[in-house]
Image (spheres, rainbow, N blue to C red):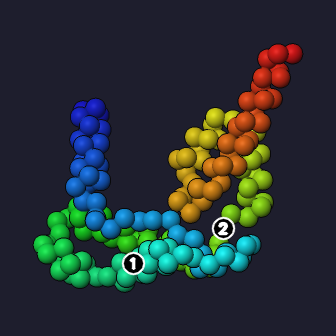
Amino acid sequence: MLKLTLTFFCALLFTVTINAAPTFSVVAITPERDSVSGASMTNKEKLKVEEMKLFAKMTMSDYENLRGKKLNAFERLSFKLTQHRVNKMLKHYSYGDSPTTLQKISWLLKGILLGPIALLIGYLFLKDEERELIKWIWFGFIGWAIILGIILLA
């Protein structure tokens, strides 16, 4: 019974992600002005940000009119989830938030101490906005591998 329930749940999840994906693609954006280098966004990036702002303000009926057909339950769920994700990305980048040096150091140390477990934790639990920290986990993992190599050779 447990296997049947798990199989049904996986099939349902697969169906939701395949069939209900909206035509709008969520892209990573950068802040309008980088605080370190002072570089501004390109016109293509500005256009993507404006598209994301329009999508974030769109209602369900507006989206149905744009597509030309009524959305089913899975498509409605997917629309709301994508809209929520876009709103979070816009909010995150409007303040220019990026991982702090302390966060980078902490993930580096986690990578050194935990090795592959830290990589797994990072890939599973870090949000899209925090994907830059994966690089620091990899640096820590390399340090972990070097330390392990030295221990095994000694």
**Towards the viewer: 38 or 103:** 38
Q: Is residue 144 left or right of residue 70?
A: right
Q: Quadrant of residue 132?
A: bottom right
Tell me which amino acid carries mark 2. Answer: Ser
Mark nearer the N terminus (2 vs 1)? 1
Can you see residue 2? yes
- Secondary structure of the residue carrying tag 2 is loop
Give me the C-alpha separation between circle 2 and circle 1.
22 Å
Classify 86 as above or below 125: below
Q: Quadrant of residue 94?
A: bottom right
Q: Residue at x 28, y 65 (%)?
A: 23
- Secondary structure of the residue carrying tag 1 is helix
**Towards the viewer: 49 or 6:** 49
Image quarter hosting the N terminus = top left
Give the image location of residue 80, x and y in percent: 33, 70
Q: Residue at x 59, y 44 (%)?
A: 121
Q: Residue at x 75, y 52 (%)?
A: 106
Give the image location of residue 131, x and y in percent: 58, 56
Tell me which amino acid carries mark 1. Answer: Glu
Q: Is residue 149 left or right of residue 90?
A: right
Classify 123 as above or below 3: below
Image quarter hosting the C terminus = top right
**Towards the viewer: 28 or 115:** 28
Q: Is residue 52 left or right of residue 34?
A: left
Q: How many marks?
A: 2
Q: Which residue is mark 1?
A: 51
Can you see residue 9? no
Classify 91 as above or below 16: below
Give the image location of residue 17, x and y in percent: 29, 53
Q: Residue at x 57, y 76 (%)?
A: 41
Tell me whether the residue at label 2 lies in contact with that at label 1, contact meaning CB atoms closer than 8 angstroms. Answer: no
Q: Which residue is mark 2?
A: 98
